[in-house]
Image: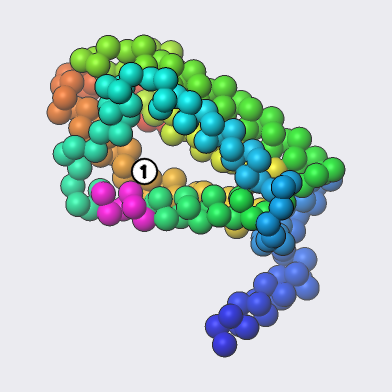
Amino acid sequence: MLNQDFKEFIQSLNDNHIRYLVTGGMKMELLPTLKIGWLNGWLLLALLGLTEGTSFLVFPKEVVARLFDRSGWSRKQATLTVVGKLFALACITLIVLTPLQVGASALAIGTVVLALGLIGMIKALLDFRNTPLDQPVTRGLYRISRHPQIFMASVVLLGICIAIGSWLALFMLLLGRLFGHFSILAEEEACLRRYGDAYRAYMERVPRYFLFF
């Protein structure tokens, strides 16, 4: 019954032309057709996985361990982070199962956004690797954002959501990042405990995400 009601809800959106937005050949749909195929969003998602996977393989073990250090997190912070990851997983699932907008400007725009995000993410990862383990990371992109890796990964996923033309995937991404904010706060608390005044001064002069935000 619930499944039928959901289908009727989606159909009502279609009938009222709320399901899609077309601007200059760019189409964004609330819930695009899902199917398994070679020309799906997973092709672009694989670039993100390849970038991160390669970094984890070539970086020293100590650097990788620092990337995933979750010591000192509270149970609440860990729980909310898991919730955020579930929304992120929903976004990834939609990306994998949704065809790319081949022939539409959405694919070109999304690919450009993705490329900018990937370039920024690679730079942020290199900045992280090249910082001594006993110092907070403040070089390179970390001079304009305290969390450039997460920001750039979000830009990559935003580009893919545009390329597949899915509002629902974009909504899941936003929810994932909203709950992921609590993991950001946990990381900053850990850095304050570890680096003290040096990191506090860094927080005062560099925004958390980007520019003024």
**Residue closest to the eye, 162 or 102:** 102
Residue 79 on the magenta segment = yes
Give above or below for 57 relative to 13: above
Prevailing secondary structure of the magenta residues: helix
Find disc 1 in the rendering and name its residue.
Answer: 181
Q: How many marks?
A: 1
The relative height of residue 81 versus residue 30 in the rendered view (above or below) is above
Secondary structure state at the residue bearing disc 1: helix
**Measuring 84% from the left and 43% from the top, which residue is drawn there?**
103
Q: Is residue 183 left or right of residue 94?
A: left
Is residue 77 rendered to the left or right of residue 54? left
Q: Where in the figure is residue 199, as x and y percent of width and height?
A: 23, 21
Magenta highlight range: 78-83
Residue closer to the observer: 56 or 110: 56
* Residue plotted at (38% across, 45% down): 180
Indicate the position of residue 75 as horizontal and vertical percent values. 19, 52
Residue 122 belongs to magenta span: no
The image shows residue 4, relative to residue 185, as above or below, that is below
Furthest toward the bottom, the residue is: 1
| Residue 146: quadrant of the picture | top left
Tell me the residue at 61%/26% (across/down): 116
